[in-house]
Image (tube, helix red, strand yellow):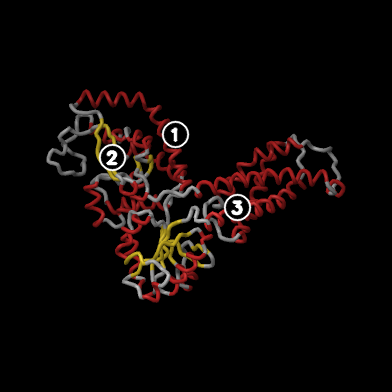
């Protein structure tokens, strides 16, 4: 996986802090304008001058509401729109919703005489301050990019007129956040197109060059006669964390329901993106750590009991360590309570477990049925090898077999593997279920991740542990 730029952390965090400062300032200014300017004469104060601290406490209390509203409208993502005008409509929406939600919270502060005029002024002043603040931040962000700080490594795919425009525009306009490393073409390009450009390789070399040059985005501009190669390029990049940005023709822009992103006047159709951005990865990791610690503490007596049962009923180690493949194809040793005899694969050939497998130990069949053998994997989660929720990890032997026979199999390696997953809670586990169906469910999870989705899967897993018919 590509290392995340520091700007992806610093800029959104700075935006949050400055938004909070702007909102807090808007409360103070609104209070001053209402009670200490000509507004006090236009709208006489009938109940006495309210204390400033009441508005300060209210501002601090409602601040999370404003921040969550902005977050919900994707206003804290790095590399925002190039022009402040593109953000202004979203700012208006967020400020309006923030005001209405804040007014709703007044119910809990009934004893304090809040002025309705203050909130009218707050809407206008917050809108002005946040727009100015974000305009300045946008200028700062562009300055970083113009000085080659925090740029994303990109490559153009194609040799048509649009590809030429992409290369020239983003090589010149660094403020878009792109560092154009070169271009890929179907065959060796002509000298006219090659002028002032760097040729990286043909389409077949894309996966190798992505890793070699640390390319983070592919800007795809294929001519109509080359459209058949789009699928081949996507297939070549299965399992690689790379973002595809397709430049569609005019008709595709009019008819497509896919996400369209405009950068410097050029429309892109995003057909593949990172499943988890840096903030979502951080949220998922923090949740994994705290949830794993909580679960391990809660099950510690049961953990000890299972350990004693495993050791007392069969010879061999307590844990079974097996090499598995996870995020970006990295390998790690996955832990399980040993449920099989120590010579279960004495012939050296890996094979899937089955319901009536003779290799199980006396307690192995029981702990396998209720997935109790998986409990030590919470230690893998704490270590960072796994997540609580994600596609189940597999051995390299089976990965090499299935990557060619199961469509999009390698896509599951774009996120950390998990103790449980969307496929498992839908009954798709064990040798008797369709591998293709499992992968389809895994990909759905990857493309639709949210923390709420993870919690839903965890709750369904608890249910499946006791009522599943496919525990193997």
Residue 230, quarter of picture:
bottom left
Q: Is residue 150 left or right of residue 458?
A: right
Q: Which residue is mark 3?
A: 137
Residue 225 figure quarter: bottom left
Residue 290, numbered circle: 1
Q: Nearer the viewer, residue 140 or 329?
A: 140
From the image, tell me which residue sits under label 2: 471
Residue 119 lies, with reference to residue 216, above or below; the image says above
Q: Residue at x 30, y 24 (%)?
A: 305
Q: Which one is nearer the viewer's eye here, 348 or 3?
A: 3
N-term-proximal mark, 1 vs 2: 1
Percent of width and height locating residue 325: 29, 45
Separation of disc 1 and disc 3 at Cα? 34 Å
Q: Earlier in the sequence, mark 3 or mark 2?
A: 3
Q: Which percent across, then down, holds residue 367?
A: 27, 32
- Please tell me how crowded label 1 is: few (under 14), some (14-19), or many (20+) other residues with Cα within 10 Å: few
Q: Nearer the viewer, mark 1 or mark 3?
A: 3
Badge 3 crowding class, 10 Å Cα cut-off, few under 14, some 14 to 19, many 20 or more, is some
Residue 82 visible in this rendered orientation of the protein: yes
Q: At 50% across and 70% down in the image, what residue appears?
A: 254
- Judged from the image, the secondary structure of the residue bearing numbered disc 1 is helix
Residue 93 visible to the viewer: no
């Amino acid at each position: 996986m590509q290392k995340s730029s520091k700007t992806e952390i610093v800029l959104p965090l700075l935006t949050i802090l400055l938004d909070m400062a702007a909102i807090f300032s808007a409360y103070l200014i609104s209070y001053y304008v209402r009670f200490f300017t000509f507004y006090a004469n236009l709208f006489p104060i009938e109940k006495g001058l309210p204390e400033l601290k009441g508005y300060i406490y209210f501002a601090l209390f409602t601040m999370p509401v404003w921040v969550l509203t902005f977050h919900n409208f994707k206003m804290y993502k790095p590399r925002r729109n190039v022009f402040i005008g593109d953000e202004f409509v979203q700012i208006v929406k967020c400020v309006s919703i923030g005001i209405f939600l804040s007014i709703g919270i007044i119910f809990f502060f009934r004893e304090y005489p809040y002025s309705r005029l203050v909130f009218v002024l707050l809407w206008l002043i917050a809108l002005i301050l946040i727009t100015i603040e974000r305009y300045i931040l946008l200028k700062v962000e562009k300055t970083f990019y113009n000085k080659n700080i925090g740029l994303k490594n990109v490559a153009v795919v194609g040799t048509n007129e649009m590809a030429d425009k992409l290369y020239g525009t983003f090589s010149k306009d660094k403020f878009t956040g792109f560092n154009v490393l070169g271009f890929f073409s179907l065959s060796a390009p002509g000298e006219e197109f090659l002028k002032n450009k760097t040729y990286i390789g043909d389409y077949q070399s894309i996966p190798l060059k992505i890793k070699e040059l640390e390319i983070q985005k592919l800007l795809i501009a294929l001519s109509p006669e080359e459209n058949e190669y789009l699928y081949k390029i996507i297939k070549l990049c299965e399992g690689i964390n790379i973002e595809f940005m397709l430049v569609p023709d005019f008709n595709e822009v009019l008819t497509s329901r896919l996400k369209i992103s405009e950068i410097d006047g050029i429309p892109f159709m995003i057909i593949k993106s990172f499943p988890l951005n840096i903030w979502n990865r951080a949220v998922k990791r923090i949740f994994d750590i705290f949830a794993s610690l909580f679960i391990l503490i809660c099950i510690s007596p049961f953990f000890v009991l299972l350990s004693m049962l495993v050791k007392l009923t069969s010879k061999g180690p307590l844990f079974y360590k097996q090499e598995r493949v996870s995020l970006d194809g990295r390998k790690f040793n996955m832990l399980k309570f040993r449920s099989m005899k120590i010579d279960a694969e004495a012939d050296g050939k890996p094979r899937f477990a089955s319901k009536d497998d003779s290799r199980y130990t006396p307690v192995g069949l029981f702990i396998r049925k209720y997935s109790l053998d998986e409990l030590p994997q919470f230690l893998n989660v704490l270590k960072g090898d796994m997540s609580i929720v994600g596609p189940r990890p597999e051995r390299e032997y089976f990965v090499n077999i299935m990557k060619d026979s199961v469509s999009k199999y390698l896509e599951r390696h774009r996120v950390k593997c998990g103790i449980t997953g969307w496929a498992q809670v839908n009954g798709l586990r064990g040798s008797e279920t369709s591998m293709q169906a499992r992968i389809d469910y895994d990909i759905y999870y990857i493309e639709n991740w949210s923390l709420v989705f993870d919690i839903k899967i965890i709750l369904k897993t608890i249910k499946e542990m006791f009522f599943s018919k496919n525990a193997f």
